[in-house]
Image (spheres, rainbow, N blue to C red):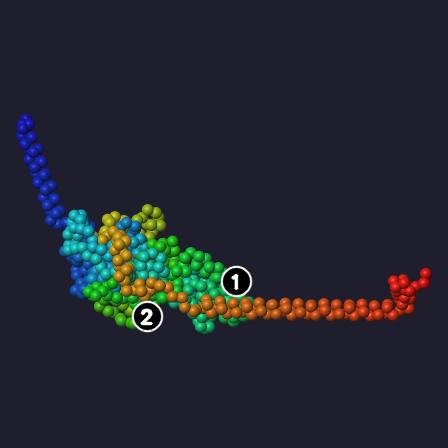
Amino acid sequence: MTDPGDLQRQAEELQKQADELRRQAEEALRAAPAAAGPLGQADIDKITAGYGFTDTSLELGALLNGEPLPGAQIRIPLGMLNRHGLIAGATGTGKTRTLQAIVEQLSANGVSVFAADIKGDLSGILVDGEPSDKLLARTKAIGQDWAPAHFPTEVFSLGGKGKGVPIRATVAGFGPLLLARVLGLNEVQESSLGLVFHYAEEKGLALLDLEDLRAVLQYLTSDEGKAELAGIGGISPATAGVILRELVSFAATGAEAFFGEPEIDTAEFLRQASDGRGIVSLLEVPGVADQPQLYSTFLMWLLADLYNSLPEVGDAPKPKLVFFLDEAHLLFTDASKEFITQITQTVRLIRSKGVGVFFVTQSPKDVHEDVLAQLGSRVQHALRAFTPDDAKALRATVSTYPKSGYDLEEVLTSLGTGEAIVTVMNESGAPTPVAWTRMRAPQSSMTTAPDSAIDAVIGASPLMAKYGTPIDRESAGEILTAKLNAAAEKAQAESEAKAQAKQSAADARERKARQTQAAQIGKTAVKVLTSRTTQTVLKGVLDGIFGTRRR
């Protein structure tokens, strides 16, 4: 018979062995955290080598494989920032902080930045970040040497709506294609609007604000201008009337403020501070959140104007400017073929001018496929797949990435806040390996800057004196209004002259009638008075009156 005490000792010994094995396994996991992730050592080595750039690069974060690997830094070469990119992810996944961290490093490397700030989230770049135990633990884990910092910033606003230096465009500079977009015109009306712009240019009628364009349309549909409307061809009075009504409705929304002079010189966005850092131009647009098409189309105008005004630079070692288009889906919603074509061409060609463009949105499907194909660098935060359409979009997103050791359909829906799937263009222009990355933290404040800090920046801006006060010089509105007024006064004078002539003729006829009547009465009187009967009567009356007649 087995002694119960022996059984107890054996059980205790087995428990000790089990505890020791568990301890050894835990130590092994801590010593080799890569084993806890989806990648093996060979994949980790490949990714590490794929991001080991020798040229100046921006730090995006550290490779994450169960735990962050600070020795495997994920970067993007500075010279590849003009090859365009995408920052995407569902709300709350950290894409704004990724954008902020990239903007900070661009500025630190002397590259100017333009970024729209719809919700005010980026204004924190004005002030130093606040350290915390959680923040420092996170940055230490990814190998980031974090220190608080702020960056040189200019604050702009569309047409002076909200805080900042006003950005305005003349109607002529904005052009018929973009204006048709914000007016919601169809293709026929868009074509007709283009002819109206051509007419104004041919006649030397400056289109500075919406009132100028209204004046041209009113003139062309007036009696005075109908002949000229027929002369420019292809525009029916009905179409001109539709455009005019849409223009009036558009102006009634307050859009009048965005058009006029002084028109912004987009070269203002390519400036450096005295210490050599690139100036960050923040477009604060909370005041136009209810006009998404105007906002997105205005950004497209800025980009097109940059393309038209900048010289060719080829493949420069670093971009002159990086342009971040936040809420990029607004740019493509209900866009015409011509508008999509213009966006595609501008994005394709503007990199030769030293300008990089990053589209910031919730899902890659928000960006038109012709544009998406040109975006060389991608930072994809978590996607949601709650519906069949979401799942379809997820599969489409996965299909655009290079092959990797990840099950991307699973990974993209399980990324934590501040984590992203990254692939960029390497120094040779080839895509880097796909890397699950814990992203770098911004050094500036991750909260909205206080009003006092924003006001101080605006108050110190040298651009406010140049662009702060609107200018109203003579243009199409004044010229055509004067012309129509002169025509109206001439018509009124002619009408009054006709009425006066008519009255004079009537008066003359009446005088003549009276004279004829008087003459007739005179003739009748003479005839009566000279008749024998009248003389006999008169003699009898007079004899009775003077008493000369005998009784």
Q: Nearer the viewer, residue 201 or 382?
A: 201
Apparent side of residue 387 relative to residue 320 in the rendered image (left or right): right
Number of residues whose C-alpha sits closer than 10 Å to that of mark 1, classed few (under 14), some (14–19) or many (20 or more): few
Depth check: 508 or 310 in front? Answer: 508
Q: Would you name the residue on which mark 1 appears?
A: 238
**Left-right relation of 52 to 265:** left
Instruction: Assess disc 2: are there few (<14), some (14-19) or many (≥20) residues with their C-alpha within 10 Å of its C-alpha.
Output: few
In percent of the image, x 29 and y 72: which residue is there? Answer: 312
Q: In the image, is residue 481 above or below residue 65?
A: below
Compute the Cα span from label 2 to label 1: 37 Å
Residue 84 seen in this snapshot: no
**Amino acid type, residue under disc 2 in the picture:** Ser
**196 is higher (above) or lower (below) than 439:** below
Which residue of the protein is positioned furthest toward the right in this rendering? 551
Q: Position of residue 211 (x, y in %)?
A: 44, 63
Residue annotated with mark 2: 309
Q: Quadrant of the N terminus?
A: top left
Residue drawn at x 15%, y 55% as measured from the top left: 145
